[in-house]
Amino acid sequence: MRVQFLNVGATYEELKPEIDRAIKNVLNNGKFINGEQVRKFEQEFANYCGTKYCIGVGNGLNALELLLRAFRIGEGDEVIVPANTFIATILAISNIGAIPVLVDPDVLTYNIDPQKIEPAFTKKTKSVIPVHLYGQTANIRDIKSICNKYKSILVEDAAQAHGAKHYGKKSGSLGDGAGFSFYPGKNLGAYGDGGAITTSDKKIADYVSTLRDYGSRKKYVHLYKGTNSRLDEIQAAILRVKLKHLDEWNQRRRIIADLYLKHLNPQKNGMFQNPVEDQGNKHVWHLFVIRTKKRTNFVDYLNQLGIGTLVHYPIPPYAQKAYSELNSLRSNYPVTNLLAAQVVSLPIGPHLTQIEVEYVIEKVNKFISKHL
């Protein structure tokens, strides 16, 4: 049997008539930039997240970068961020001339450890960006308390957490603003690049809306040195269709994760460890990430059986050549180093079948038993 890591095309197969109709309507309308579909999606996604505003942009990186700019964060300012994130979070900071200050995660949830945030604060700290990694929100209650204490901006990186909840509130509404990605593999994914910012601050929303469109509110009148980062009209139409199904798809992911958690056999010796859902959270399982000390053997074994896996992420940002100035700090992040060496993502997605899930469970448990 072959089990894909994620069947991205299955969403189109399920919604083909609706998506085809939505795309055709855009083509027939002839309005391809900042049209009706973008405006309607922005309103619908803001309502979904529980915020007053949503601004569609070109991708998740742009969402974070423009949001930081809107909060007037820039050259020489420090932004605290988890050390174990995709590089886009770090790029958003350095691209505006700010300084990323990396903090190790909690070893159980993989999200930034609030106890390590406050010691990282300096007089230059302007913002904290907790990443809701793998579909689970960070410990926002504790992080927000720290941000309030130091009067710093809390920006959510919600690129992997569409629909996730923290004590009943959805990601995107937990801080001063949030950045989302609609990369095709996300829980809410477009069929190309796309992103959005959510906030309930009108000034920030207005500023981002201007920055994304060449710094202009009126044609040929430019208030700021902006950029071109607009959500595509066709992608917005597709996202509007898929948003109606997001909660159902997230629930399917939760069912699969529950089966994994119930039937996979973790070992107390640390050879194999399941992920943990933190208190007060409703995980949407963008990824189901386990840890094993025998990752190379484990991945090879599953690949031979036709089971797709991925590693998120094998090389942390501070170990990348692009951030050579941070390379010497590797020893400061023991948990991130541990995760980089041990994590493996198993197949999960709304279109994974019961038979496929049972097959994965059977083969994983067989590997565990063999290596006790």
Image (cartoon, rainbow, N blue to C red):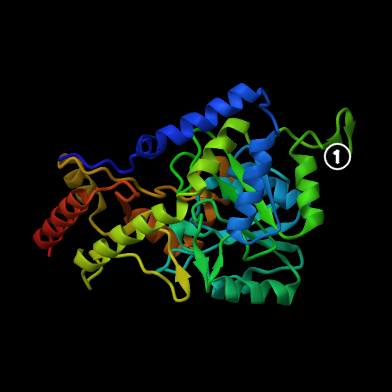
200 or 272: nearer the viewer: 200
Q: Position of residue 204 (x, y in %)?
A: 78, 54
Task: Quadrant for the C terminus, please.
Answer: bottom left
Up the image or down, 252 lies above or below 105; here it is above
Q: Relative to residue 204, is residue 262 drawn left or right?
A: left
Is residue 72 among what the camera can see? no
Q: Position of residue 208 (x, y in %)?
A: 76, 46
For the residue labelled by badge 1, is the local secondary structure a helix, a strand or a loop?
A: loop
Q: What residue is at 42 percent from the left and 67 percent from the top?
A: 109
206 or 18: nearer the viewer: 18
Up the image or down, 137 lies above or below 62; here it is below
Up the image or down, 22 lies above or below 254; here it is above
User: Which residue corresponds to mark 1?
Assistant: 224
Up the image or down, 68 lies above or below 61; here it is below
Q: What residue is at 65 percent from the left and 25 percent from the top?
A: 29
Task: Quadrant for the N terminus, please.
Answer: top left
269 or 231: nearer the viewer: 231
Q: Which class describes the residues within 10 Å of circle 1: few (<14), some (14-19), or many (20+)?
A: some
Is residue 84 among what the camera can see? yes
Q: What residue is at 23 percent from the left and 47 percent from the top?
A: 299
Q: Position of residue 367 (x, y in %)?
A: 14, 56
Q: Position of residue 56 (x, y in %)?
A: 66, 43
